[in-house]
Image: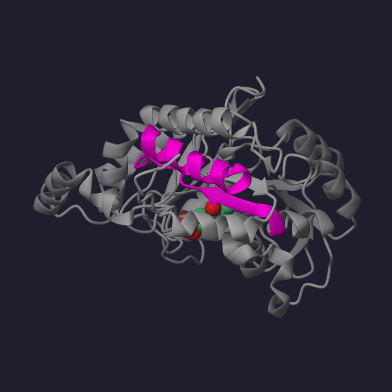
Amino acid sequence: MSYAKKNVPFFNYPRAYLDDRDDLIRIFDEVGNRGAFIMQKDLRDFESTLATYTGAKHAIGVANATDGLELAWMAIGLRPGDEVICCSHTMLATAASIKTAGGTPVLVEIGDDNLIDPNAVDAAINPRTVGIMPTQLNGRTCEMDKIMAIAQRHRLFVVEDAAQALGSKFKGRHAGTFGDAAAISFFPAKVLGCLGDGGGVITSNDSLGDKIYQLHDHGRDVQGEIRSWGRNSRLDNLQAAILNHRFNFYENVIRRRRAIALLYQSRLECLDELKLPPGPDSSSNHFDVFQNYELECDRRNELKEHLASNGVGTIIQWGGKAVHQWERLGFTCRLPRVESFFERCLMLPMNMFVSDDDVNYVCDQIINFYRG
Ligand SMILES: *Cc1c(COP(=O)(O)O)cnc(C)c1O
């Protein structure tokens, strides 16, 4: 077989602007003319959309999801020595939010689904444990019934890292609404992205919602009264206006991402060298939004090079390291399952800018690599 060589970048950042350019310019102009830059109607509208959509009682726009996670732990009130269990297969930001809020992250293994292993969580609990922080990774929600049962048994707080999981569900319930609070990211390459940094915290706990609100705006409550020390971690009103616009098409985004995942699956499931993520219809318990399409593969580095030389951009997530493998941060544990995952993982292009032809081309190159 011969192919016209294509270029399929992993994520085409300029298109995050260009595909939407006319609408975005209209929004800049409209918001600019109102001088509506900080904490204006667009932000309030977006917060209420986010709460309604996820089913959370409160949503607070914040500067980014990392801040949101940290603010959630600050509001809960971590003290020195308090341990929070999270998975080492996550972005460093998950563990960092525990640390910067004053606690100690305790890293544990993945289960068969490559998400936090509930048995490992159970085994890590000790008298210093105060919380669990599952990551709803790649747009898939963990088996939250198991996590919440453990949390309830031991009276632990749960903050979900739902940065990648807006719209993802487990047993019909939205990611971010199982625990005490959660943060969602609107980084440009996320499932719902703005044109810079942005995040949201959701919670259904009134007093936690009040505290997070105060912390994110100089200690002020909704009436503008100072209630506590705080800082500034607000979502820009302009970014909120962009998010309001983009949210109108969000169901299409999810549908498209799931269709891409199905196409990858149908083309690649014939290869024993690959372990694919669960397909979009593989379980009625899970509704995945496919923030990423991450597979495990034999001869990973060679495959990555082969794809690069054929114009296909892929990513080995997070610099190819699990959180506990950043030795300078002082971790000493060994987590063999996570470590072997990071030797085999690869993310294929998965976003609104890849066409079916692009996906087929990527799959052709992979099949050529193993069978050519
Ligand atoms: C993107 C991401 C974050 C951080 O989000 P920011 O908005 O960039 O701070 C945290 N956790 C996970 C799993 C992420 O993917």
Q: Quadrant of residue 27?
A: top left
Residue 151 against residue 238 in the figure, above or below: above
Residue placed at 27% from the left, 45% from the top?
A: 242
Magenta stretch holds residue 101: no
Work out which residue is located at the far top of the displayed protein and give it: 284
Residue 361, visible in the rendered structure: yes
Residue placed at 63% from the left, 36% from the top?
A: 141
Q: Position of residue 361 (x, y in %)?
A: 43, 40
Residue 56, visible in the rendered structure: no
Residue 19 against residue 35 in the figure, above or below: above
Q: Position of residue 126 (x, y in %)?
A: 90, 56
Q: Quadrant of the C terminus?
A: top right
Q: Quadrant of the N terminus?
A: top left
Left/right of residue 285 with respect to residue 319 in the rendered view: right
Q: Nearer the viewer, residue 36 or 265?
A: 265
Q: Which residues are magenta?
A: 343-372
